[in-house]
Image (spheres, helix red, strand yellow):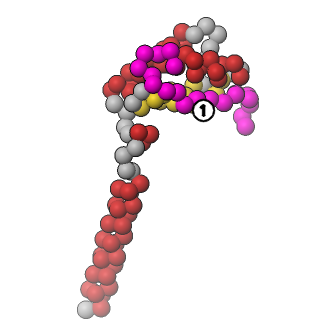
């Protein structure tokens, strides 16, 4: 009887723990613009911005990541010159469908660390 009671208590504790975890996860994932999954339109906009950056003369897009959500474009990664940080934002703003740009680009310092 003791083993059966212990098993039931463990099962109850595990069930309560998983419910609490779900509740926390549900609260943490409340819908916000920044956390929504990419829609096909977001992916298309991101590709358009990346294409525009790649066509910009003298701009190396290889270290730049583009994320689009609802017209808001976030640029992250690194570029080789400080001028390219501002240039990337200007190019992204010029793409049709972009409503704002969060520029999180940094200057590439080289090396492994």
Residue 106: % across, % down: 66, 30
Q: Splitting the image into 4 quarters, where does residue 3 fall? A: bottom left
Q: Is residue 49 above or below residue 13?
A: above
Task: Quadrant for the C terminus, please.
Answer: top right
Question: Who is closer to the viewer here, 99 or 52?
Answer: 99
SS assignment at label 1: strand
Using residue 8 as the reference point, say whether residue 21 is left or right of it: right
Residue 110: % across, % down: 73, 28
Task: Quadrant for the N terminus, please.
Answer: bottom left
Residue indicated by mark 1: 104
Question: Who is closer to the viewer here, 15 or 8?
Answer: 15
Tally of numbered discs:
1
Farthest-out residue, bottom: 1
Which residue shows up at 33% across the image and 26% down it? 40
The answer to whether residue 106 is magenta is yes
The answer to whether residue 78 is magenta is no
Q: Is residue 71 above or below residue 29?
A: above
Farthest-out residue, front: 99
Which residue shows up at 45% across the image and 22% down it? 98
Which residue shows up at 39% across the image and 61% down it? 24
Residue 20: % across, % down: 36, 67
Query: Looking at the image, can residue 47 be seen?
Result: no
Question: Who is closer to the viewer here, 99 or 111?
Answer: 99
Query: Looking at the image, can residue 73 be seen?
Result: yes
Magenta segment: 93-113
Using residue 55 as the reference point, say whether residue 80 is left or right of it: right
Question: Within 10 angstroms of label 1, few (less than 14), some, or many (20 or more) residues?
Answer: some
Which residue shows up at 54% across the image and 9% down it? 55
């Amino acid at each position: 009887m003791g083993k059966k009671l212990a098993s039931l208590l463990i099962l109850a504790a595990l069930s309560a723990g998983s419910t609490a975890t779900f509740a926390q996860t549900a609260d943490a994932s409340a819908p916000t613009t920044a956390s929504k999954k990419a829609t096909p339109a977001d992916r298309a906009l991101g590709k358009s911005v990346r294409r525009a950056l790649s066509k910009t003369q003298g701009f190396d897009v290889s270290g730049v990541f583009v994320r689009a959500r609802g017209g808001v474009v976030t640029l992250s990664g690194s570029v080789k010159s400080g001028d390219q940080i501002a240039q990337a934002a200007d190019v992204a703003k010029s793409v049709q469908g972009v409503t704002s740009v969060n520029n999180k680009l940094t200057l590439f310092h080289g090396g492994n660390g």
